[in-house]
Amino acid sequence: MPRVTHDDAPLLADLMPWSVAPPRLGRGWPTAPDAASLKARWDALVKADGPDREALFEPTRSRTLHSAVGQLPGQSSGTEKLVRAFGPCPEPVRVLHAPFDEQWLIPDHRLIDAARPELWRVADTHQIFAVETAAAPDSTGPLLLAMSLLPVLRPGRIRPLYRRPGGQEPNLAPGLLKHLASRLGHSPAPVDVLAWMLATVRPGPDGLTVPLTENAELWAEGVELGRRMLWLMRRDGERPKLPGGRRPYVRAPLPSRPQALRYDRDEETLHLDEGRISPVPPEAWDFEVGGVRVLEQWFTARTAQGTPGSLTAIRPATWPQAWTSELLELITVLALLAELRPRRAELPVSPTITAAELHKAGALPVPDAARRPASVLDHHEEGPEGQFALL
């Protein structure tokens, strides 16, 4: 358990005590930027026999064609061993594969080394997942991401906002909301606390810290800023837009199979081979998470060829129009998030509600049960070979 600094800001790990390690896929082919490729990969797998199927599957110590595992919670994939599997591909689901990179995943427990079923049990339309990012020296990128999609990115720990489906039982230190209400003069909602965290989280020697305030006006300012960040990160609902002529457009058609990405800072233009998109603000191009430029990582994931003969080599023959739309939206999101950095920097970081105060009020330390998943089962989950799981 992380050490608590009693005279300073409390740790994020104490304020959102239940966390889960990121899923470990074990193989790359069950994820892709497009769902059609996943269905084609699955078809190629189940049409292969014997050693060919095994080679395509890419077995690990955790998963082989003979592994017996149950369904992922909320999914309807088969549970027979993959050595005998046939039929259509389980319907792919949207996940966050890398920072700001939404991709598709075949939600089949037999394909994933460590799927973290406890995350799937609480993933619904009410859930928001907070994910710690990899710290990088001198990086201006966010330390904490928040998303509606189930995250499969590594390496940061995942902290669901709610411990139960339906937005029930916030994953916050017991007593935190009550103590904040007594100091602020009103009762904040769990999503307000998460918004404040997004706006104020800071690195510390023992992990991320969250300076808390008793100033109601400052709290409202931080929550409003954090909610703006949350809306941009989640990207559900109304599409974000840059005002007027700042909106990025395709100025020269993108090629059918672009190979290289280049940015012209003077012209604020993104080049995909001979294709051109502009205006692209420098802040969007420079946007990094964990020391990795987001736009470059996003492009590489869609142009990597995959090993010949492997399932990852099954990819779209040409650049889909949907990817262009996603790229334009991603540029917009990154630019708008970058615009919020000065406001974040201006928020005071010195806590007026310290870890010591939360200990005195009984909100800390959190009980061990708060660091474990809640019992959320209200229906049977299918186990290996069609048997009901015993839970």
Image: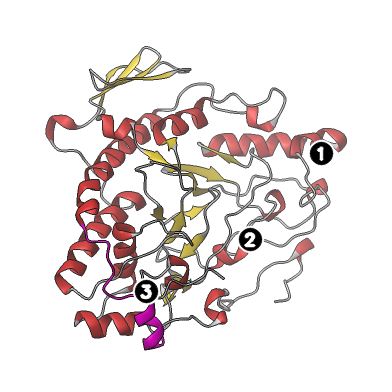
Residue denoted by label 3: 7
The disc label shown at residue 72, or none? 2
Residue 211, quarter of the rendered image: bottom left
Q: The residue under label 1 is which amino acid type?
A: Glu
Viewed as shown, does residue 381 lie left or right of 355? right
Q: The residue under label 2 is which amino acid type?
A: Leu
Relative depth, front residue between 119 and 379: 119
Distance, label 3 to label 2, CA atoms, is 43 Å
Residue denoted by label 1: 54
Identify the residue shown where x is 43% and y is 60%.
208
Q: The residue under label 3 is which amino acid type?
A: Asp
Distance, label 1 to label 3, CA atoms, is 56 Å
Secondary-structure class at tag 3: loop
Identify the residue shown where x is 41% and y is 36%.
294
The spot of residue 274 in percent (x, y) is 37, 12
**Quadrant of the rendering where the N terminus is positioned:** bottom right
Assess disc 3: are there few (<14), some (14-19) or many (≥20) residues with their C-alpha within 10 Å of its C-alpha: few
Viewed as shown, does residue 170 lie left or right of 251? right
Residue 252, quarter of the rendered image: top left
Segment tinted magenta in the rendering: 347-362
Q: Residue furthest right?
A: 50
Identify the mark nearer the N-term, 3 or 2. 3
Viewed as shown, does residue 38 lie left or right of 232? right
Q: Residue furthest top?
A: 274
Secondary-structure class at tag 1: helix
Assess disc 1: are there few (<14), some (14-19) or many (≥20) residues with their C-alpha within 10 Å of its C-alpha: some
Relative depth, front residue between 58 and 106: 58
Distance, label 1 to label 2, CA atoms, is 22 Å
